[in-house]
Image (spheres, helix red, strand yellow):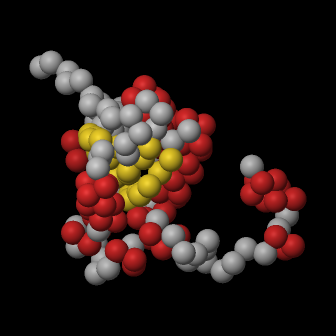
């Protein structure tokens, strides 16, 4: 089967969907998701990727991102998925592929498509009957929109260790 050329529109956000191979459940625990989110934002910062919306489900992820070019976007997803798969396989004592070879995606060049895509991503857990309202699902990161720490008490820096202060600064 011939590989399709990925469509990319300069300056337009791109909807990315990464699925587990054969419907494999990727995120079993809180720790799996936190490691993925941490890696996601580190690789995004390094690659100059801006995230408009994101949602992590049990066996797949969705995100709407802006990138300089198609190569930067592809290397961001490739680096993220391979680094996470290596960590995941080591921690869970398994071998083999974790994500499908090619991530799904489509450019969203007009405002109407961008809005519809954000709504789709944020409402994914509601459509999957995981929760009643999108705001109740912690892994679509919607609750962080208006609050820095919606699921925990505020962090007071005067009570932090030096290591934590350095990590926060980084």
x and y percentages locating residue 46 in the rendered image: 60, 37
Look at 21% across and 69% down and name the residue there.
127
Q: Is residue 23 visible?
A: yes
x and y percentages locating residue 120 in the rendered image: 26, 62
Towards the viewer: 59 or 88? 59
Seen in the picture, residue 122 relative to 81 is either above or below; the reply is below
Q: Which residue reaches farthest top?
A: 2
Seen in the picture, residue 133 relative to 43 is either above or below; the reply is below
Left or right: residue 112 versus residue 149 is left
Towards the viewer: 80 or 104? 104
Look at 59% across and 43% down and name the residue there.
45
Seen in the picture, residue 58 relative to 17 is either above or below; the reply is below
Towards the viewer: 41 or 22? 41
Towards the viewer: 64 or 137? 64
Q: Is residue 93 visible?
A: no
Quadrant of the drawing holding the N terminus: top left
x and y percentages locating residue 109 in the rendered image: 30, 45
């Amino acid at each position: 089967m011939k590989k399709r050329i990925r469509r990319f529109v300069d300056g337009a956000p791109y909807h990315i969907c990464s699925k587990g191979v054969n419907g494999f459940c990727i995120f079993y625990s809180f720790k799996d998701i936190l490691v993925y989110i941490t890696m996601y934002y580190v690789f995004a910062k390094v690659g100059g990727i801006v995230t408009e919306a994101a949602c992590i489900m049990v066996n797949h992820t969705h995100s709407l991102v802006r990138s300089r070019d198609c190569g930067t976007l592809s290397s961001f997803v490739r680096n993220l998925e391979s680094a996470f798969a290596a960590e995941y396989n080591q921690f869970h004592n398994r071998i083999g592929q974790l994500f499908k070879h090619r991530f799904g995606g489509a450019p969203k060049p007009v405002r109407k498509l961008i809005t519809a895509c954000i709504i789709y991503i944020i409402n994914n857990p509601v459509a999957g009957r995981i929760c009643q309202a999108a705001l109740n699902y912690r892994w679509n990161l919607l609750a962080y929109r208006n609050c820095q720490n919606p699921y925990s008490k505020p962090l007071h820096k005067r009570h932090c260790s030096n290591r934590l202060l350095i990590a926060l600064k980084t």
